[in-house]
Structures are given as C-alpha cells and as structure tokens.
Image (spheres, rainbow, N blue to C red):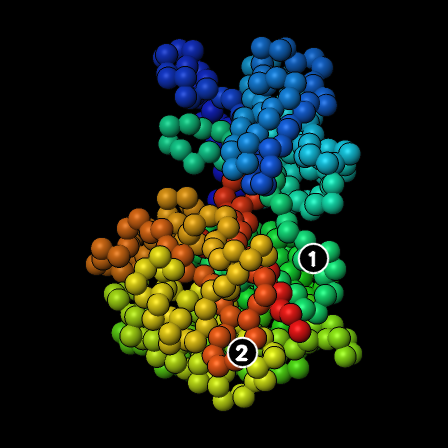
Amino acid sequence: MTPRQSRVSARIASVVAVVATGVLGAPATARADSYVTLRNDTRDRVTVRWTATPTGLDASRWGRPGEATSIAPGATARIAWFNRHVGITPGATFVFGQRIEVEGAAEGFPLRQRLEGSIIGSDLAQSLGDHDAWFDDGHAHLARWEAGGRAFVVAGQVAERDSVFEVGDDIVYSIEEQTLASDDPRDPDELHVLTYNIWNVPLLSEQAEARAAALPAYLAPYDVVVLSEAFDEAILERLWDRLRRMGFTHRTQVTYRPPAPVSSGVVILSRWPLEDAEAEHFDPVFPDPEYLSSKGFVYAKLRKGEGAASRVYHVVGTHTQSDTLGERSAVRARQFERIRAFIDARAIPPAEPVIVAGDLNVDRHGLDYGVLELTLGARWPERDADGEEAGVHGHPFTFDTEDNPHAKAAVDMAKDTIIPIVLPKLGTEQVFLDYVLCDDVADRIQPSAARVETRKCWPGATPLSDHYAVYAKLRFDR
C-alpha cells in the first residue's frame, strides 16, 4: 500500500470513528483530529510564532496553545490541531502559518499547513520555507536553514499514526542543528568525520529508499563520511549521485568476497582527492547469516588542502561481526588484528593521522571495549577542544530500541524472521557500537583537540536508520 492509499484508508476510518463517537459514544481517542508538532533537536530553546490563521473556519474547529510556543532542547511540543471533517466543505481551502525563531537570527523559518476539503473529510499537506511547494506523500522533506551564523535542517512530514487506538495522520516537524565543518572548512589540519550505519538491507529494511533520499542534507557538512550497511547498490548509486553534486566527488567502491551474494556494504565518501584505496575481506563465519555478506574493511588515503600546506589522512572504514547468533568477541578480535596488520604493513609516517571508523559491534560501555583498543591499536580521542577528557556528546547510545523505532523494528524482525530461536541477546538493546577512533601505535600523531558526538539524523516522524551516526571533529597540530 502506498502512503497515499494508506492515508485514504485512514481518512475513511476516521470518518467511521467520528460517526461512532456521535452515535455509539466511542472514546475520545478516536476523534478525527490532526495535530502539528515540532521536535527541537538543537542545543537551545526555540520559539514557534504564528504568522497566519485561516479565514472562514470556525475557531472551534482548530486550536493552538497560544500566539507563540517555546520548546526546550530535546523536547517535542504540539503547536496546533485541526478538525478534519466538521465544518470543512469539499473544495474549501484553509492555510495555517508559523515561523521558527532561534536566538541570534534576524528572521524566522516559515512553516505552513493546508487543509483542502474533499468528498471524504479533507486532505492535509505541509510546506517548508518561502516557496509554494506542498507535500502530502508521507515522506520526510527537508530544508536547510542558515541563521545567526548557524546551520539547521528543518524537516516536515505528513505522518500516519502508528496506533490501533487512533486513526488519521498528523504533521510532524523537527529542527536539528548542523555543526558547520569549521570557520574555514578548507583548514587542512582539521578533519570532520561522520560514520553512519544506514540500515540499507534489501528486502529487510523499512523505507530504505525514502530514508536514503533524506540523507544528503545530513551528510553535507563533513570532510569524510564512512557508511556501513549500504548493501542496496541501486540506492547507494542514487545517493552518491546527489552527494557528488554537493561536493563529495571521491569515494571507494563496495566490494565482494565470492561466493557471498551481498557486498561489504562499507564505503568511504570524501570531499578530498583519494591518492590510494584498497579493500580486504575477513574470513567468513559459518553458520551465521552474516556469512552472506562480504565482511571486511576499506581503506582510503586522502589529501586535504593543496600544496605544501596540505595534509595526508588515512581512513579505514569497517563493519565487524555482530553477536546476532551468539557471542562473537573472538571473531571480532581476529578482524581487528587483520586491520592492525594492514595498517602496520603500509609503514605510514607517524606525522600522518590514521582514523578507523565504522560499526565495530563492540559496546563502549561493555567489557569488550578494552579488548578492542588493545587489539586494534586505536582509541577514543583523548582530549576535547577545552583540554578536558573527551567523552560522548549527545545521545549515549548509537543503537537504542527504547528510543529509536527502527532499532526496535530491526530487533523484532530478527526475532520473527531471521532467527527462529529467540536468544536472550535480542531484547531491549541500548548499546554504543559505532566509532571514530584514532590510531595510537608507537609515536603516531594524536589529535590535539577533538569533539565526538552522536547525531540522531531524525527528520519528521522517524530517524533515518536503526543506528544513530557518530561525528568526530579532529584537529592535529603540526
């Protein structure tokens, strides 16, 4: 069923609910209302201020908390509600408008909603920014907004309710700040790396095409992006085509280990030229569903900047064995040793930074993390920009079934389809599995300042993957 067909079905169901409410005394949760909410994923409080109210629609048929709604960081607030049926005649159109305001911005970012009367109830659409494009297709649509020297991604989505007790659809907005690469993004001594498991598994991942279409707005600010689980090559190529137009003109290729039918799913995207690129595959683990994928790692040598001021960086991207069918720490240790041997064999000069990034399937909060650092010879960046010990900014987990609906769906799918025997491991999962680490063998240069944070990348009603991304801002002195 397409999103539009689904909403038509929901609209019919909501009409039935309205009738049931009046005739049978059904509970109030079945009312045919739609709500408009905004989630504030910035570090500051934002204000939503009204700019337009509809004419011709009785005030009892819609509502708002007030002329302005203040939303704290990390909070979600309802900014409006509409009755979708009573008082709306076929052909009538009603438009509502607000603007998002952030401290230091001279102008706000416009939001609009539209109700159009139809034979059955009304059609709902939303718009972002100062253009006349309206969206009602059920997908998250994004706009980039620069204000007060800061950059934001604003997302809007007409989203069907995921509840058997309520019918209809709502408009879900979100605002998330994008850390700009730096005051001077060309600074060769600073590298901005994002690693993201994008959960792009053919036939298994939910909404893979729509999620991939929303990714470029989130990947834009970085120097290097390491993707894992980019298994669907058709989707990856379309994503790459859009990112290439945004400046990511260099990449590695996904690779295969015959006879595995699925690629490694790991790719490095770079704004800066690659001077060398290689890939290796791990020994397959059998019996295990991951035997079907070409597990391994990719390597890229890139040069940021030009001439004598430029700097060479070495990046390894990987996705190591998971514990889906039981504890696999010994397998991962061998895979880390393989990466370590590859780095050592290249005899990389100590003044050239080496970065290992990806989904390492080791919980940073667990006992295996020490084994990871010891075996791989890479560690968490030691100091942040203020000279303090570097921790994790943002959400404390990169895979969280309590917070991320896609993570819960992935675990439920593994229970119900891939693994007939439900293992204790597959329950509530709150783990930190994704990393940007710095090689620290011998006298390898270490970052003089670093900031590492999780990025939820959550436009509209759901995030863009079952994992959250990890971003590292790394500065290396000369």
Up-down relation of residue 310 to residue 21 (above or below): below
Neighbour tally class for label 2: few under 14, some 14-19, many 20 plus, Cα within 10 Å: some
Q: Which residue is mark 1?
A: 182
Q: Look at the picture and state if 142 lies above or below 264.
A: above
Q: Kindly identify the residue that appears in the image at 68 percent across and 75 percent down.
A: 311
Q: Is residue 221 visible?
A: yes
* SS class, disc 2: loop
- Residue position for label 2: 444
* Residue drawn where x is 65% and y is 18% of the image: 67
Q: Position of residue 177 (x, y in %)?
A: 62, 45
Q: Is residue 341 above or below residue 153?
A: below
Quarter location, residue 135: top right
Taking the spot 74% from the left edge, 36% from the top edge, the residue there is: 105
C-alpha span from label 1 to label 2: 24 Å
- Residue 174, image quadrant: top right
Badge 1: residue crowd in 10 Å (few <14, some 14–19, many ≥20):
some
Q: Amino acid type of disc 1?
A: Ser
Earlier-in-chain disc, 1 versus 2: 1
The quadrant in which residue 155 appears is top right
Position in image of residue 323 (x %, y %): 30, 64
Q: Disc 2 residue type?
A: Arg
Which residue is at the front of the view, 416 or 350?
A: 350
Q: Nearer the viewer, residue 55 or 77?
A: 77
Q: Is residue 159 left or right of residue 319?
A: right
| Residue in view at x 63 percent, y 73 percent | 251
Q: Decide: marks 1, 2 in contact (CB < 8 A)?
A: no
In terms of depth relative to the viewer, which is nearer, 399 or 380? 380
Classify mark 1: helix, strand or loop: loop
